[in-house]
């Protein structure tokens, strides 16, 4: 009986973990059951009481400057509310201060005051407190390099106003047992004398994005922001609060606010089934990335000849991976993204060392010139040079034109930033062209026997997964097109695989190892 490999065991364990995670996700959306003998709390909203909504702000100065900016009598808490509010910006805030916002819910029948301190102390009142401002590096930190030479730009974080502020409240008529109050809502769970839990009122941090920040300058005296209230289910509220807690914890692991903002975009306005699909597909994507990496390294470690393989494609991947790594450093991306990119860069340079047959030791870099170039390798190199010569006529003018356009019409932080951005844009926009030399070599040799097809297969599946996300996730049109362009190249690879079939049953008479030989070319030689 054949023993399973460690790779197969790891894959099975990985999928078991994913299905367990999806099952736990479904559990978050389930309401705890109140069994006989438990102390159970009904929702305060089960009698549909009338509520009033108050919104206050404070500039956190010594005087407090707490003032009411909006109130709504007989608040319809079962419907979505969007209200644009005009806000006066005080001198303290203009000098890099901050603004705190308070949302207060009180029963309509008990309202006898409009003073904040008295409102929050009324029976059955609920309120939440949050920052309406955030410190962030301003957009003005970038400028046109040609028009504003020598400009001294400060990249220090300054006060920004959230142009969209969101709150959510659970409006489900449910009963929660005392012994099974979820941990996510523990801090917001308050019970009155009637054993009713007060409205679960919370900030919706998922829908407050970095793109909605508006800079407050020393000249800003008034700004508008949109106050958004959304009723939600108990499960959805638990999930959003759990995600919020998780995002805060990941900041300590090296993630940046920008990274977390991208994650928010995945979870905002998303139903349970789509979340499960996203989790499953994303996990498969991660697994295929690992398998592709593993097989790629195995292929290059055991490969001795460059016959049938494009040397310039390997050099391009090393160059492009280096540019992407430098771009991530320039953008201040988190270490959890930079470190894997750096490892990938080292791997690509290791491949280059395999191509040029170099070894690194304490004595320095050594080139292995013992083995002369074979006829197959020479033929491959000539085809590679021929294809790159044709591509250069198209590629270089496009890259130069894109760099000049970016310099004239787009702002940048520095000349170094412009250089890196121009190079990385060239990598993203035209990088797929460097997959063409391998197609050209396959066509001229009428063979695909030298390619690492297992690694290619994993990459192809990952490309199709990227296509799925291109449909279901909001992204720029240019990036969406980039997801589909690689498909064309992979389809041509598959066509060449069918056109030039490989016979893997042949055995090398000297080494005793199996050798991949093109069947059609082999038949021609026999005839």
Image (cartoon, grey):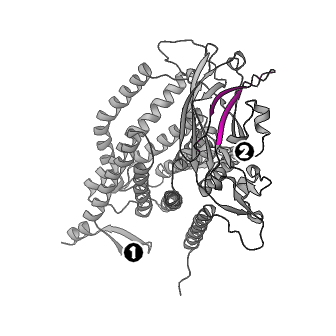
Q: Is residue 16 above or below residue 99?
A: below
Q: Nearer the viewer, residue 426 or 278?
A: 278
Q: Nearer the viewer, residue 382 or 392?
A: 392
Q: Residue at x 61, y 52 (%)?
A: 171
Residue 447 visible, this angle: no
The x and y percentages for residue 441 are: 30, 52
Asked if residue 70 lies in the magenta stretch, the reply is yes
Residue 355 image label: none
- Secondary element type, mark 2: helix
In this rendering, the label closer to the viewer, 1 or 2: 2
Q: Residue at x 62, y 17 (%)?
A: 217
Q: Nearer the viewer, residue 38 or 507?
A: 38
In the displayed image of the protein, which residue is found farthest to the left?
A: 527
Q: Is residue 47 above or below residue 318?
A: below
Residue 92 visible, this angle: yes
The x and y percentages for residue 354 are: 50, 52
Magenta residue span: 51-76
């Amino acid at each position: 009986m054949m023993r399973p490999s460690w790779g197969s065991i790891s894959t099975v364990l990985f999928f078991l973990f994913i299905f367990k995670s999806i099952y736990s996700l479904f559990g978050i959306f389930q309401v705890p059951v109140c069994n006989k003998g438990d102390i159970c709390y009904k929702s305060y909203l089960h009698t549909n009481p009338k509520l009033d909504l108050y919104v206050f702000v404070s500039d956190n100065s010594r005087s407090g400057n707490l003032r009411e900016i909006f109130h709504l009598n007989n608040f319809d808490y079962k419907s979505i509310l969007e209200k644009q509010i005009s806000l006066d910006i005080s001198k303290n805030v203009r000098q890099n201060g901050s603004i705190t916002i308070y949302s207060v819910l009180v029963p309509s029948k008990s309202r006898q005051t409009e003073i904040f301190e008295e409102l929050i102390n009324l029976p059955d009142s609920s309120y939440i407190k949050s920052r309406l401002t955030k410190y962030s590096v301003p957009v003005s930190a970038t400028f046109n390099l040609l028009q504003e030479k020598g400009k001294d730009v400060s990249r220090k974080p300054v006060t920004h106003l959230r142009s969209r502020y969101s709150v959510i409240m659970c409006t489900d008529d449910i009963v929660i047992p005392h012994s099974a109050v979820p941990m996510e809502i523990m801090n917001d769970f308050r019970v009155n004398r009637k054993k009713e839990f007060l409205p679960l009122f919370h900030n919706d941090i998922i829908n407050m994005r970095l793109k909605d920040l508006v800079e407050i300058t020393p000249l800003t005296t008034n700004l508008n922001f949109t106050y958004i209230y959304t009723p939600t289910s108990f499960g959805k509220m638990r999930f959003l609060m759990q995600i919020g807690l998780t995002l805060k914890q990941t900041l300590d692991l090296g993630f940046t606010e920008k990274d977390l903002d991208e994650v928010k975009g995945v979870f905002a306005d998303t139903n349970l089934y789509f979340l499960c699909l996203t989790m499953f597909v994303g996990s498969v994507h991660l697994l295929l990335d690992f398998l592709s990496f593993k097989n790629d390294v195995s292929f290059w470690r055991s490969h001795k000849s460059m016959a049938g393989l494009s040397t310039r494609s390997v050099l391009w991947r090393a160059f492009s991976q280096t540019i992407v790594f430098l771009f991530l450093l320039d953008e201040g991306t988190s270490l959890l993204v930079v470190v894997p990119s750096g490892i990938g860069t080292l791997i690509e340079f290791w491949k280059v060392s395999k191509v040029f047959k170099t070894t690194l030791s304490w004595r320095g870099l050594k080139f292995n010139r013992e083995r002369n170039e074979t006829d197959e390798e020479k033929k491959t190199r000539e085809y590679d040079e021929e294809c790159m010569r044709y591509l250069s006529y198209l590629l270089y003018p496009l890259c130069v034109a894109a760099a000049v356009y970016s310099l004239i019409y787009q702002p940048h932080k520095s000349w170094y930033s412009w250089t890196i951005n121009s190079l990385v844009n060239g990598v993203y926009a035209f990088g797929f062209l460097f997959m063409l030399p391998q197609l050209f070599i396959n066509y001229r040799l009428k063979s695909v026997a030298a390619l690492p097809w297992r690694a290619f297969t994993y990459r192809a599946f990952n490309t199709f997964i990227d296509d799925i996300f291109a449909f279901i996730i909001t992204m720029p049109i240019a990036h969406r097109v980039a997801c589909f362009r690689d498909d064309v190249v992979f389809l041509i690879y598959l066509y060449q695989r069918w056109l030039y079939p490989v016979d893997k049953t042949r055995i090398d008479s000297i080494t005793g190892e199996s050798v991949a030989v093109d069947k059609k070319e082999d038949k021609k030689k026999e005839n």
